[in-house]
Image (cartoon, grey):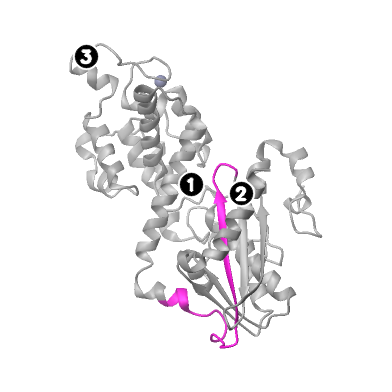
Amino acid sequence: MLVSELIDQQTKEWNREAVQRLLPHEAEKILSIKPGKGCAPDKIIWTLTKSGIYTTKTGYHAAETQATEMQTPTGGQNLFDWNNTVWKAACSPKIQVFLWKVLQGALPLGENLEKRGMRENIACVHCGDKETAHHLFVSCSFARKLWELAPISTHAIPSTNTSFADCLTSSKKLICLPPSGIVEANLFTWISWALWTTRNKKIFENRTISPEKTLSIAISEAREWQGAQITEKGRDKDSTMATTGCLRQQQVESSIKVFTDAAWNVSHRGAGLGWVFSDTQRTAFAHGTRFEEFVGSPIMAEALAIRQALVEARNMGINDLQVNSDSQVLIRVINKKELIKELVGILQDIYELACCFSSICFIYISRKDNSTADSLAKQALCASISR
Ligand SMILES: [Zn+2]
């Protein structure tokens, strides 16, 4: 059987009935992959890079990881690379300090409290076993459940035979699977932090948080942090040029402008898309919204909004178009024709649709200049979720 047999050839959307019937346990993941509607060719993708293109550097790392996994981990503390593993970890400074405390035995875990002569409240809040760093973050049944749900391949799940320090060391190479949207953040560190806060909420506020919720907190905080890093990098000259550059031809004075935005909900995996057209006098003359299910990441939602706006513009017979979005990353990707593996089909659609216009350009604008599209997107999301 071929993947194409699960796609409706007319609409180029997944045949939901077939997906649910044949692969019910994978249905949500499959539906989160958005096929392009145009003719993006099939291709082989290397999952260890953001672009999906093989590089010898990542190939070398993968081979090296495999080789070291076969050897027995030694994990001597004196060989521990503090700088790279803790102080350069892809997480917030708060979490770096937290990791340092875990490794120094300075976190008030049951085991450490016991060493200081305390006898009470030293057991794991989830299962009652002795609370050590390794137990709480790796081997407790609560942590195991969470690791199994995490968007990482099964062989990347921290092994119960490996110390916390070794898990942290190997997490530098941890790759998150699309469509999690985690590219740069080290998810191991964010999950450890979320496990710690969940434990504290249980102890100090008597609030129980499920493994699912704990994971979802870790992922959304990691994404938020990652988004802020990209914005900082985006301030360099090169990407400023890319975010205002045009894909084809120069910006035409008589261009119609379309403002697009998306609102995305992490727990429902749904996205509201909004767009508004305005003429050269800056008068809005058309707008629309749409709700999409099974959307895996905010950038996917933004790309779907742009694709939909291009379809609308083409149907209205617009010739010169200026597309405005507040997703700096996406505008850069489109203008530089970069690749993002989870967006391959949608980006191809955008490039194909762009050819329908005499002139078109893609421009990054700030959020405050995109408020109309933003509220349309939010309305579409709220209306569908509250249904
Ligand atoms: Zn436990």
Q: In the rendered structure, does residue 242 fall within the stretch colored magenta?
A: yes
**Direction from residue 376 to residue 120 in the image, left or right:** left
Residue 265, relative to residue 362: is it above or below? above
Q: Which residues are magenta?
A: 241-268
Q: Residue at x 48, y 53 (%)?
A: 48
Picture disc at residue 176:
1
Find numbered disc 3 in the image and state the secondary structure of the residue it sits on. Answer: loop
Say if mark 2 contacts mark 1, CB within 8 Å: no
**Direction from residue 85 to residue 378 in the image, left or right:** right
Furthest toward the right, the residue is 10
Judge whether residue 76 can be spotted in this image: no
Find numbered disc 1 in the image and state the secondary structure of the residue it sits on. Answer: loop
Judge whether residue 278 can be spotted in this image: yes
Furthest toward the top, the residue is 119
| Whole-percent x, y for residue 83 in the image | 23, 47
Residue 282, relative to residue 206: is it above or below? below
Q: In the rendered structure, does residue 213 fall within the stretch colored magenta?
A: no
Viewer-side label of 3, 1: 3
Closer to the chain start, of discs 3 and 2, is: 3
Residue 13, relative to residue 283: is it above or below? above
Mark 3 lies on residue: 118
Closer to the chain start, of discs 3 and 1, is: 3
**Direction from residue 79 to residue 339 in the image, left or right:** right
Mark 3 burial class by Cα count in 10 Å: few <14, some 14-19, many 20+: few
Viewer-side label of 3, 2: 2
Q: What is the CA distance from the residue labelled 2 to the residue labelled 1?
A: 29 Å
Q: What is the CA distance from the residue labelled 3 to the residue labelled 1?
A: 39 Å
Mark 2 lies on residue: 382
